[in-house]
Structures are given as C-alpha cells and as structure tokens.
Amino acid sequence: MVDGSLESLRARNRQAVVAAIQRRPGSSRAEIARRTGLSATTVSTLVAQLTQDGVVVEREPARAPGGGGRPSTGLGLSPEQGAVVGVHLGHGGTRVVLLTLDGTVRGETSTRSDVDHEPARSLRAVAADALGVVDGAGIGRDRLLGAGVAVSAPVLHAATLGSPPMLLDWGGIDVAAQLRDQLGSPVQLGNDATLGALAEWRLGAASGHDDLVYVMLSEGVGSGLVVGGRLHEGATGAAGEFGHVPVPGAGQICRCGNRGCLETVVGARALVADLAHSRGPNCTLDDLLRLADDGDAGTMRLLADAGRTIGGLLAALSVMLDPAVVVIGGDLSASGLAVETVSRHAHEALGRSLPPVSNRDVPVLPSALRGRSEALGAALLASDHAALRLVGATPGPA
Ligand SMILES: [Zn+2]
C-alpha cells in the first residue's frame, strides 16, 4: 500500500502544480513552490515531467486576453493540448469565446436574442455557435476539452442550477446535460456574475487583488464576489444577487417578483426604456452604446444617474466585505465611455456613502474585457476542469 500512497501523493502534487499554473499563467517555479507549499526541488521535478509530457511549456512574454493584466514570462499550459469554450447565456443574448489552455482567445461570437423565453432554441444556437468557432479556429473538434456556461441563475459547485424565476422559462431544463450531448465534451455551469468576477480577477481590472466585488451591468444585473482569494458562492449559490437589492423609492415590479429591485432601475432594459422618450420606442442597447461612445448628453446623464444609484448600494456591501477594488462590467462595458461614466459616478457616490469607520477610498474600475467577462470566466472554469482531467489521466512518474 506504500507504493499506492506514494503514487497518489505524486498525482496530487502534479495536480497542485498544474492548478497553480492554470490560476496564474506565467508563474515561475519559485512562485509555484510558494503557493503550493511544495519544496522547490519537488516543483522543479514535477515541472520537468509535465514539460516532457507536453502539458506545460515555457511561455513567451504575452498579454492576457482583453488587453488587461501584466505581461508575463514563466510557465503556462501548452495550447497544443486543446481548447475550451466559454458560453454566456444572458437575458438579452448569448456570447461564445474559444480559449486554448494557455489562455489565448482564438475566436468568439455573440448574438442578441430572447434567451429567457426560448431555452431550447438558445441551447441549439450556442452549441452551433461554439462548434462554428472551434471549426473557424482550425482546432479539431476532438481537441475541444470542455465547455463552461455562465447562466443568470444561482449555481452551486459548477453543477447545480437553482430554479428561481431569474431565468423565466428554464425551470427543469438540464443545461449541462443538453450542451454536453450537443458538444460531445464535459460541461460545467456557473453563475454569470460570479464567473465575470473570476475573469476580472484572473485577467482583468482586478488582477492582483484577492478581495473584489464585480458588478455585471447587462439586461440582468448581478455581482460576483472574491473573498480572501476564493470565489464566494454562498450557501445556495445565490451570493451576490445585487440586481435584486431594492432601491429606495423605486417602483417597478421585477421579474423576481419583488418591487423596485436595482435591476429595474439600472438594468440595460430600464436604461434603454429611459432613452425612449427622447430617442423613440425602437431604441436598443446598441443605440445606447453608440450614443455613449458619441458622448450624447442625455445618455451621459442617464449613465451618471445609474452610477450614483449603484454606488449608493455598494456602500453597504463594501462595509461588509471590505473589498480592495470594485469592477463594473457587463454588456454596458462594450462602450468604454459608458462604463467609465458609470464607474466614475459610482465611485463618487460610494465615497460619500461610506461611514467614517471605513475611512478609505475603494477604487471603482471599469472592466477592460469589453462585455466578455462572463464568457471568459466560463471558459476559465472549463479550462480549470480540463487541466485537472489532463493530469489525472496522465500516468504518474515511475
Ligand atoms: Zn428582483
């Protein structure tokens, strides 16, 4: 039994090294030793074996996808091992990104559609989009190692999908199983705002911070929390449902059944509806983003007000969690000027609302991932699982 124990210890150590490289591509051997608690000699031996197996490679200096993050050299997973797709099933449309295991974006596509009311059609469409992006990148479908799916619903442990009315017509649908059948590869689920936080933490504006709040500002509004270097899902996967915090004085009935939720005030649908008075009833989110990029005065006022509302509600969250940074993203961040305006005014309102005991300035930063945080986070989730399966299947050293 001693041999078996040694074997499983080696397997666990290999997995720890691969997980450390996956979480922070570009890490040096010394950094991996520090983060895993393994000795420098053990890490060097394992890295040499993983390199020989073609799982790990020395990286060239590279920037993280989306232009965020620092240039880095060091160790990375080999892109030759394969790729994963990240899918975002938002309320107002779908997005698919293709990521090789070294973290390079190799393709993407997005579609605006009524995801809430058309589950079967949406699942078929994203499966077709995903396979289309894989084919378009010249990556064989046999090298698609997995998929991650970001959904607008509470999710626990990458599998259990809650069924509150957040996704209106999706009750009883096994998203993971249906997509697994259509893609022919393993599928993990995550809450979209939580996965957005994962992407901002690993690749985006919150890179280097282990305590952060990410606010997703799309048709759905939510938040993702990283607390003490871990994603925080809560007891039931529903942590961070920021979009359903009531705004004092607001009166619309929300799709969750409550009245006056934040989402009914600053969600993309509410913002577009506010513009309809001056821009006509056919105004869309794309119109809003274009007007923001043009610096339109009415649109800027709308976004500033949204930022102030968000900032006021962020104060309570900041007092409770003491984040190093808040990041604003979601579909609104497809326009740099839109997300910068919201972030600036949220920062001012947050600063005014923080009690003296907090006594510090919490930065509120615009996402640099341009509306792709949720899909990229879903791809990172799939990539983490794929990387571990890869070493689980590789025989340990003799
Ligand atoms: Zn609500």
Image (cartoon, rainbow, N blue to C red):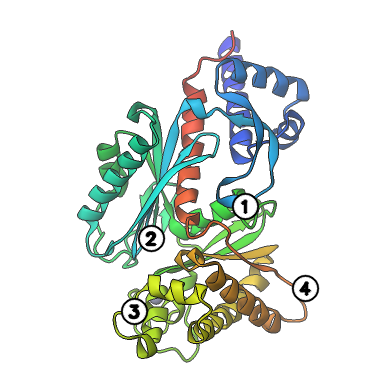
Q: CA distance from mark 1 to mark 3?
A: 31 Å
* Number of the label disc, if any, that sits on residue 360: 4
Q: Looking at the rendered structure, which numbered label has been put on residue 68?
A: 1
Mark 1: give few (<14), some (14-19) or many (20+) Cα within 10 Å: some
Amino acid type, label 1: Gly
- In the rendered image of this protein, does residue 257 appear above or below residue 334? below
Vertical placement of 329 versus 248: above or below?
above
State how far apart marks 1 and 4 are (Cα).
25 Å
Residue situated furthest front in the rendering: 294
Residue 283 — which label? 3
Which of discs 1 and 3 lies nearer the camera? The answer is 3
Mark closer to the observer (1, 4):
1
Callout 3, which amino acid? Cys
Amino acid type of the residue that numbered disc 4 sits on in the rendered structure: Arg
Residue 348 screen position, x and y as percent? 67, 80
Instruction: Check contact, mark 1 vs mark 4: CB within 8 A.
Output: no
Q: Residue 393 location in percent, x, y? A: 46, 21
Sooner in the amino-acid sequence: mark 1 or mark 3: 1
Numbered circle sitting on residue 153: 2
**What is the spatial separation of the Cα atoms under label 4 and label 2, in whole angstroms?**
33 Å
Q: Secondary structure at mark 4?
A: loop
Q: Earlier in the sequence, mark 4 or mark 3?
A: 3
Picture residue at 49% right of the left edge, 71% below the top? 242
- Mark 3 closeness class: few <14, some 14–19, many ≥20 residues within 10 Å: some
Label 2: how many residues lie within 10 Å, few (<14), some (14-19) or many (20+)? many
Name the secondary structure under disc 1. loop
Q: Is residue 7 above or below residue 248?
A: above
